Image: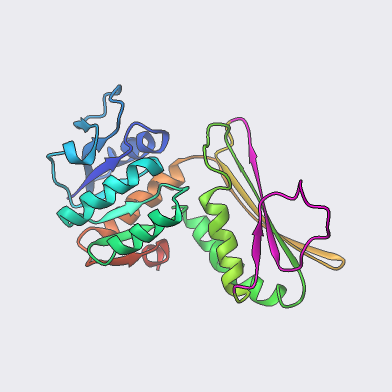
Amino acid sequence: MINMIMHGCNGRMGQVITEIAAGMDDCRIVAGIDVVDNRENGYPVFQSMDDCDIRADVIIDFSTKSAVDGLLAYAVRTGTPVVVCTTGLSEEQLRAVEEASSRVAVLRSANMSLGINTLLKLLRQAASVLAPAGFDMEIVEKHHNQKIDAPSGTALALADALNDAAGQEYQYAYDRSQRREKRSPKEIGISAVRGGTIVGEHEVIFAGIDEVIELKHTAYSKAIFAKGALEAACFLAGKPAGMYSMSDVIG
């Protein structure tokens, strides 16, 4: 049995993960971390990692960027592997994640779904062919109206996959409203839509001369991310220090 701490347990994803984990036989959540304890989770909830006196085999993080620094410090101090799913991290925080991975096992992913991680592989293959052929690359992402960060971490991961395959020659364009010039051939446009209860939709467009290729992933439920996070946590428990990704989980 793998014991887990749910960091951000009373958020939307924390609650979905809690519900799914309750029906699993090989893992269980033994403690949660959240600034607000207004739910009956079936496990004790602490306001911070420093307050938590329950040890576990792994931590799952779906919180806010302001809570990640304390999380990483705790993980390093206690040697507890951590799955970091919080998006919108600063460059300094991303460096801190990398530094933590030299001391403890860390798995960071902007999106935990199997479909998105398969899409990342497909995009690298497509961009390696289409970018040199002059195709413009654009990303449109859509999420619910409660999402704080934009563009989504997943959209940035998709852009990074395109850019990696194209030799890191591209710049990201988030807003063209103040520009009065043609689109640069060396840019990847990223557009964010926020509305309603959209769980998550990411579309990548390869626009060439007289032809367009579109690759799209749509999430209809947060359960796909919760299941992926739990699979990642089970994979990471007991692993040596290092930086891991969902590609390690799915093989």
Magenta-highlighted residues: 168-196
Q: Residue 181 vs residue 236: left or right?
A: right
Asked if residue 59 is positioned above or below residue 118 in the image, the reply reads: above
Residue shown at the point (27%, 47%) measured from the top left: 71
Q: Quadrant of the C terminus?
A: bottom left
Residue shown at the point (63%, 33%) measured from the top left: 195
Q: Residue 175 colored magenta?
A: yes
Percent x, y for residue 118? 52, 62
Q: Residue 193 vs residue 230: left or right?
A: right
Considering the whole magenta stretch, tell me its main secondary structure.
Answer: loop
Asked if residue 36 is positioned above or below residue 249 in the image, the reply reads: above
Residue shown at the point (37%, 41%) measured from the top left: 66
Most extreme residue toward the right is: 210
Percent x, y for residue 246? 41, 61
Asked if residue 136 is positioned above or below residue 114 in the image, the reply reads: below
* Front residue of 48 and 14: 48
User: Which quadrant of the view contains residue 242?
Assistant: bottom left
Q: Residue 199 vs residue 245: left or right?
A: right
User: Which quadrant of the view contains residue 223?
Assistant: top left
Residue shown at the point (78%, 52%) measured from the top left: 179
Percent x, y for residue 36? 31, 26
